Image: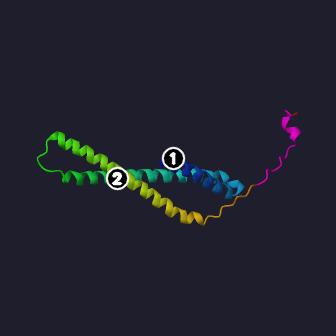
Amino acid sequence: EMLLVGIGLGLTISPIGTAVINDADETKRGVASALVIILRLIGMTIAISSMTTYALSRVATLVSIARDAFPTGLDAAEIQHRSVAAYFASGIQVIDEMLVIGAVVCFVALFPALFLHGSARIEPAKESARKPEDAFSMGD
């Protein structure tokens, strides 16, 4: 699954950034490039922190529910064994939930992406004011 995510991100992030930068005026491409990078970093920071908060909170809730279901009169070793099993099961469940959340977000993001009409213009290189033979001269 992570291989698919990596391939998808690699095939998505670069073309989107390139489309934004290419669509900017020539004099503003540096600003557009910086804006793309800043917004990407802000998005990653918010996504990672919010998903981490969700995961930790959800695992704690699921483990608390599992511990409440423990029978009374267990010895310490059995409580520890059941607690480890509860954390493991809760972690697996939360990872599954986060994958579903990621899939839903990607699916929702597909709709606005369908309406993007980026320009694929390729501008010809401008001729230099100097002649090619002047590039090698050391100046007089």
Pointer 2: what residue? 93
On the picture, is 83 further left or further right than 43?
left
Give the residue furthest to the left: 73
- Range shown magenta: 123-138
Kind of residue at disc 1: Leu
Helix, strand or loop for disc 1: helix
On the picture, is 75 further left or further right than 131?
left
Between disc 1 and disc 2, whose residue precedes? Answer: 1
Percent x, y of residue 44? 48, 51
Pointer 1: what residue? 3
Q: Which of 44 and 84 is in front in this view?
A: 84
Category of crowding for the residue at label 2, using alpha-carbon neighbours closer than 10 angstroms: few (below 14), some (14–19), many (at least 20): some
Q: Which residue is drawn at 52% across and 62% down?
A: 109
Percent x, y of residue 5? 51, 50
Percent x, y of residue 4? 52, 50
Cα separation, mark 1 vs mark 2, equals: 20 Å
Category of crowding for the residue at label 1, using alpha-carbon neighbours closer than 10 angstroms: few (below 14), some (14–19), many (at least 20): few
- Can you tell which mark lies on residue 13? none
Q: Residue at x 71, y 55 (%)?
A: 26
Q: Nearer the viewer, residue 91 or 57?
A: 91
On the picture, is 64 further left or further right than 121?
left
Percent x, y of residue 119? 69, 61
Contact between marks 1 and 2 (CB within 8 A): the answer is no
> Which is the main secondary structure of the residues drawn in magenta?
loop
On whether residue 87 falls in the magenta region, the answer is no
Compared to residue 118, the image places residue 89 above or below, namely: above
Q: Quadrant of residue 140?
A: top right
Helix, strand or loop for disc 2: helix
Q: Which residue is drawn at 79% across and 53% down?
A: 124
Q: Which residue is drawn at 22% across and 45% down?
A: 82
Kind of residue at disc 2: Gln
